[in-house]
Amino acid sequence: MCGISGAVWTNQQLQVDRQTLQSMNDSLAHRGPDDQAIYWQSPWNHEADASPPTASTAVGVALGFRRLSIIDLSTGMQPISNEDDSIQVIFNGEIYNFPDLRQRLEGNGHRFKTQGDAETIVHLYEDEGEECFRFLRGMFSIAIWDSRLKQLIVARDRLGQKPFFYAQQSGRFTFASELKAILPVHQIDTSINLNAIDQYLLYQYIPHPNTIYKGISSLPPGHSGVWKATDGSFKSSAYWQVPPARAPLAKQQAIDKLNQTLDEAVVLRMQSEVPLGAFLSGGVDSSLIAALMQKHSDQPIQTFSIGFQESEYDESKYAKLVADHLGTRHQSFLVQPDAMSILPELVHQFDQPFGDSSAIPTWYLSEMTRQQVTVALSGDGSDELFGGYHRYRAVDLAQKMDRIPGGKALFSSPLWQKIPSNMSQRNHLRRWKRFCQAMSLPPLQRYMQWIGIFHDQQRAMLYSDALLNQLGNNDPLDFLAEYYDNLHDRSPINRFSLMDLQTYLPGDLNTKVDIASMAHSLEVRQPFLDHHVVELAAQMPANWKIRSGKGKRILREAFADMIPASIWTRRKQGFGVPLDHWFRGPLKELAQQTLLGDTATRRGLFVKAEIQQMLDQHTSGKFDHAYRLWSLLVLELWFQRWKPDFKIPADL
């Protein structure tokens, strides 16, 4: 695991000098604290790492690498080249099937000088060209400089576990593992993308390919791209997509194959030359991963969980139950989250606005786990693959209600909203009212009404006239609609869950895990996101996953005896923090001062009276606006950290 950065250019005025490259590399030190290296050559400076190219090529190359040593501790540095140094590779991630690939490549005559996975990419590219990425089983972001063809080839793994940001200009292509590593480069457009703010307030993250900056993009998951020095063009395309629906295996065959494939995915992710463990929350997913790890270990594996004083958010007793059952060496850390102190760290590391408050417990868990191990396995991805979220049951219920004559009118009646309920987000009656409120909408808009932070009407009331005018007709829902439309041949549950797999999972969950863990130099591996597991689950009918209101049915059928029965039947509990209490307690004053202060007001983005009303309704207990207030607070603190002088131009 590591951090990568770099640039290629044909315009001398856009040259990225050594000092700038070093600054880019330094900004990623947390991703790779063990070592670093840079590769730099330019036809406009003869102090290059290699003989300067001839004038006809006129292309400069800068590659930066920060290393977190996991495998091949002695010879695994990057950039790494082929036999004649015509190809240079840097990559962030892990290629789990590299031993098999290496054997094949050696059979083809390639000579290896290291024992790590990076060199596999070099020689695989030599054999397969731009098609090489489909042979990789792992998580990765990759940059390959081919001096023979004078082109840079880049790629991101299928599910977006590893990030890849880039800036494409006439005469230069710049890239990095994190946005902050691109900022030292001069003449990149870092003006604020207002449409990204609109997306952020709907989704709580900024979806690919957008970023908060107009001039920087995020390479979508499962995509590769080629920048050509000959014309300065950059073209990207998908090398992987969720496979089309086809007739599934017989159910028992599917169960057997799931057992085999997930087991193999875990074993592959246990490759490490440094201490390794597992996150263990006490839910089904992390418990199952820990159980499979223990199955293949001849000594107790290390497992880690965190606990909270608030019982509604504390799963530590379930984690201990599983750890005792499996016989792991378990450590549970009781934490008292201090939002006041952690917010500045989150805003710095999540270097564009990110509103998922579960980043806080993920941050603490990563910090504690890194004190003991360098690699941890987690259970991320299972909910999207096997119907784990409550909202998929809502999709199923809504579909059934749509078929009842008059059902849509009955359940969308405003009378439901008059029933009193408390303000807890987890209150059943409140959830029912939210469900009914959206029943009159088409399926995709209805779904977004359930899961969105600020829905359309709320954003329209919140936004200033200046912001509304500049947003124009851009609809933030278009991001989801593209994936939703491509899944038209699926059942409603599979359609929405596979949409989430390609949108919410990489944009929110994988971003959260990558940034929070790498901030502490911890590598997190996610067996459920092995693309063999994903492709198998994508072919399973929804009724194998959700039945009688319960999700993950086929997981239980495949692995029932591996974890305690009580874990399979316990109610799903989110990995969160008590935001609702915080905004009536320790965050109340900070929110008031930050969101209603002169600095935020001068930005001209929002109607101050609407924010005041939200704060008043929340503190008085009339309504729970905790997630909305958190998103706004993070956004303003992000501006204060990264763009303190920003205010919306009123004359555009």
Image: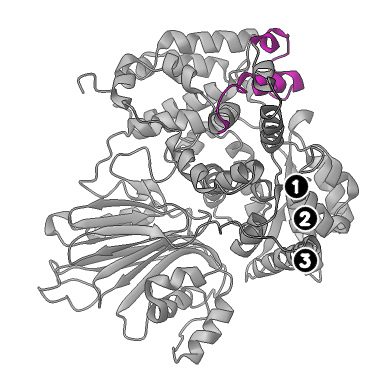
Q: Which mark is residue 416?
A: none
The Cα atoms of the two marked residues, 3 and 2, are separated by 20 Å
Q: Residue at 67% of width from left, 56% of height from top?
A: 537
Q: Residue at 38% of width from left, 80% of height from top?
A: 126
Q: Is residue 261 above or below residue 448?
A: below
Q: Which of marks 3 and 2 is nearer the N terminus?
A: 3
Q: Disc 1 on helix, strand or loop?
A: helix
Q: Residue at 58% of width from left, 74% of height from top?
A: 97
Q: Mark 2 points at which residue?
A: 288
> For the residue marked with disc 3, what is the amino acid?
Gln
Q: In this view, does 507 lie above or below 395?
A: below
Of 157 and 604, nearer the camera is 157
Q: Position of residue 390 (x, y in %)?
A: 71, 35
> For the residue marked with disc 2, what is the amino acid?
Leu
Of 353 and 398, nearer the camera is 398
Q: Mark 3 points at which residue?
A: 253
Q: Judge whether residue 423 is colored magenta.
A: yes
Viewer-side label of 1, 2: 1
> Tags 1 and 2 in contact by the CB under 8 Å rule?
no
Q: Earlier in the sequence, mark 1 or mark 2?
A: 2
Q: Name the residue under label 1.
A: 543
Q: Judge whether residue 321 is colored magenta.
A: no
> Tags 3 and 2 in contact by the CB under 8 Å rule?
no
Of 74 and 209, nearer the camera is 209
Graded by Cα atoms within 10 Å as few (under 14), some (14 to 19) or many (20 or more), the crowding at tag 1 reads some
Q: Disc 2 on helix, strand or loop?
A: helix
Q: Where is residue 555 in the image (x, y as percent from the top left)?
A: 78, 54
Q: Where is residue 339 in the image (x, y as percent from the top left)?
A: 58, 29
Q: Is residue 280 visible?
A: no
Q: Earlier in the sequence, mark 3 or mark 1?
A: 3
Q: Residue at 79% of width from left, 43% of height from top?
A: 547
Q: Where is residue 528 in the image (x, y as percent from the top left)?
A: 66, 57
